[in-house]
Image: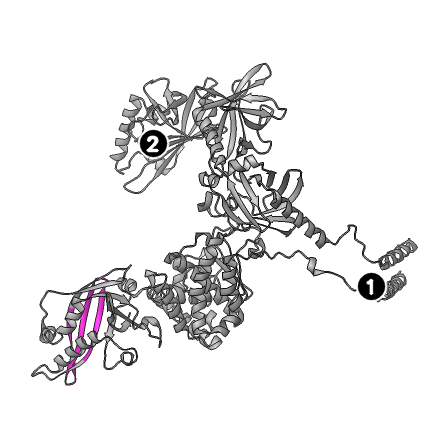
Amino acid sequence: MKRLIFLFACLFIFAGCKKSSFVSKFDEDPEVRMGEAIAKVKNILSSAENGWIAITPTADGGGYSFFMKFDAAENVKMYADLNDASSTTEYASYYRVKQDQGVDLVFDTFNYITMLNDPDPATLGGNRGTGFKSDVDFIYDRSSGDSIIFTGKRYRQSLKMVKATATQRAAYESAGLKTAIDKVKSFFSTNKYPYIEIVSGTSTIKAGISINTTNNVAGGKRLTLTGVLADGVTTATASTKFAFTLDGPFLLGTDLKYSSITFVKILWKDASTLALYDSTGKEYIVKNSTAPLTPLYLLLGASYGNVVLPNATTYTGWGSEYISRRATAASAMLNGGYALRLEQMTYTFNNTTKKMTLKVNMPQNATQYVGTLNYTYTRGSDGIFKFTYVDADGNGTLIVPFMAALLGQRLNVNTFTVDYLSDPISGGLYAQFKSIENPNFTFSGALQ
Amino acid sequence: MKNFIKNSLALAIILTIATSCRKTEDLDVDFNKYNLDMPETNTDLDKWLNTNLLDPYNMKVIYRYNRYYYGDAAADVAPLKPENVRPMMQTVSDGYLAPYLKIAGLDFVQRTNPKEWVLYGSAKYQTDGSAIAGTAAGGRRVTLYGLNSFSLAPSFVNSRLYVIHHEFTHILNQTVAIPIDFEAISGGTYKQPWTLTSAATAKDNGFLGSYASGSPTEDYAETTATLLVSGQSYYDNYANTSNATAKSRLKLKESNVVNYFNTAFGIDFRKLQKEVQNYLKNTIKDPSISFGYWLNRNLYKSMTINLDNDVTYSTYGISDQFRTAYQTSKANVIGLSGFNLGFGSVKLNFTSATAMTMDVNFSQGTTNYVATYNFTMSVNDATGAVKFTLSSTAPTGNAALLLTSVQPLLTYLNNNNFIADWLPASYNTGTYTNFGGFYVSGTPANYFYGALGQ
């Protein structure tokens, strides 16, 4: 054993002593090869005479698209689908390609793409400190043919660029992106309740489509499918990020899985028809329903969390009995010794815990107070709600006796159905509750 | 076993030494092929930066984004709009470089001026929710954030110059250390993280804000920047509204800074202060540093005018119109038949933001008397316009006795529309707020001024 150790020690020492001139595994030194890679990426970017169509998701927000033209003098000009201005006005800034952990494309002065990174909420509405969680530095990944792909240095989101054709370039440079965006927006504002039909087993189910074209970090630039599965009661929802291109919304990733189908594309089938396509290429024409597809009771506490009743004495969907009882409650609060005014009421549902919270705005002079009342509820398979009062916070306890006409005598003891209500004037979508025992006791509020 | 280890160790050492002696060829690295990250453009902006900042002061402005200059992996900082570079650096040049060049000289600026100025578009947000507007490092780099919102509005320029003077103080402190007696002034009350110290607590302990209460270095930079940019009036008002201990601490810190600039760098801090204030007053038109603004907040309680016994008037002069009104009134008082009076001085008392009384101090033999005349006063913050209106109530006592004699002064004050300003304009023998005055609107050559009291 000792000898063995000695032998190995000697071997290691001698092996360690062996010197030879360094011979690179590669042809060139690292800095030379990196220099070549930098030159290559820069050349690819700046040699595309009609520019690039670039698409990236953001880590916290939705997806975004750009039309970029690079030149050899480190200038980049771009359009983007952030808003009307960015889709119609070309903005110029600098870029450079440098060595980082790989080849790094930096958008090193302000432009549309850096607005996604901007930590100041005033710039585009991103979160304070982190914006939409997008990058300024993009590390080169690979390129082939007409495409080049980068990965965000910090947030690891891919930035995929495809060479634009002369026709596409001409379209971008004549506000074509805004036209394309407006066409999609117009389709979804004309077709209020769009849906697709999916064959699931022996039945055909419908999945409603909603599209959020805002820059809201949490919900913007997303397309969502919502509906009831084949069993008739289970709701399903699937959502994915998208960016606008000249061809319409471009879906990012493979998140849009609904009823075990993965949707990968949405395209204009003809001038006025949109269609979704799944991963096998199957087409699903987007149709329009005259009314919302999914019964509201299934979505309350899931897709919709809140029903907000405004500070008003009458309102669309408020029955005569509700109006008079609300007036009674308001009067009791005002004259109950605290001079409280009954204002906005928010019903918040949680379908998982089956809890409902009623928040009542109850200002005294100029000071806003909020009373919180806690309920549990049951929801029958027929969509009938029964609320059970649990408790309330200090403010809530104070107003419970004042609001007896609304709560103790109605909400706490009656059973309710709920349905959509469309405001004939604003077109806004409301939820309306109807008491089964007292048909004139109905109230409604905005769905959020 | 021991021997074995000993032997093999010895062998190993010998072998190592032997092989260590072996030399191979020279290290052959060609740095020309190294991929330096030095973006170069030659736009009008770059030429302007080179001509105005790089060539004369060796001041390199880095405005193209490089995440390693802010160096915080946990922060997102947005790149800058290039069109904001030149106006921002012009502001730096006018509000920071020019005052130092004039008072401290080219040699001082070339020696101490930070060599790298890194500019970013957004603020650098911290995980605790605060946002950083600027940093200084190693005596050679200043980093400024949040410049995408650049404007020449007084609030923006004031806040950025504040950051620059704050950071430059750090640079100076990194060159010549803070006097050791400074830390003892608020000794024992420095505490981190500063965000947990309320502004009120900081003020009670003699700090200019929560941030200053974090550490002596920040305290020092805040004291300097406040005196230079926010102005002496702001500083005095802050001190006056603190408790007695805090006020004395603030005053000690002020004199510490003034001495530091003088002994460490041979800079007259008071002249430097006036230069920065003049830029803000004349170019940026910042109303919050003006005499009128602070008169309107009743910081200054009095103005003493004694044309014949104050050397300031012989040094800096006084307008003929006021001299005539003053000297005629004086002669009238002395010549008042049958009283044999002596004339002392005139004092304006700003008793509130809307009232002023004029005291005429006179004497008979060895007894001093005062004749008091009441005026109402109105001050416009934005323009500095001031109007005095003599009370219509007939004066009594001493004031009635001298009414006719001092009528030229009363008429001068009552009949003119004034603009409040730091006068005399060329005053440079002390703090610029020692004297303040008024000139007739539209006729700057017709003015008067006096020593201010708080």
From what the image shows, is residue B179 above or below residue A390?
below
Say which amino acid is labelled 2.
Answer: Pro
Q: Which residue is disc 1 drawn over?
A: B24
B374 to the left or right of B98: left
The residue range painted magenta reads B344-373
Q: Chain of mark 1?
A: B
Picture coordinates of residue B185, whole percent (x, y)? 44, 70
- How far across and how far down the image is residue A307, in percent? 40, 29
Q: Amino acid at mark 1?
A: Thr
Q: Quick check: A292 above or below B258?
A: above
* Disc 1 crowd, CA 10 A, few/some/many (<14, 14-19, 20+): few
> On the image, numbered disc 2 is attached to which residue?
A310
Picture quarter containing residue B412?
Answer: bottom left
Q: Position of residue B306 (x, y in %)?
A: 23, 78
Secondary structure under the numbered disc 1 in the rendered image: loop
Task: Name the mark on residue B224.
Answer: none
- Residue occupying image coordinates x 29% and y 77%: B316
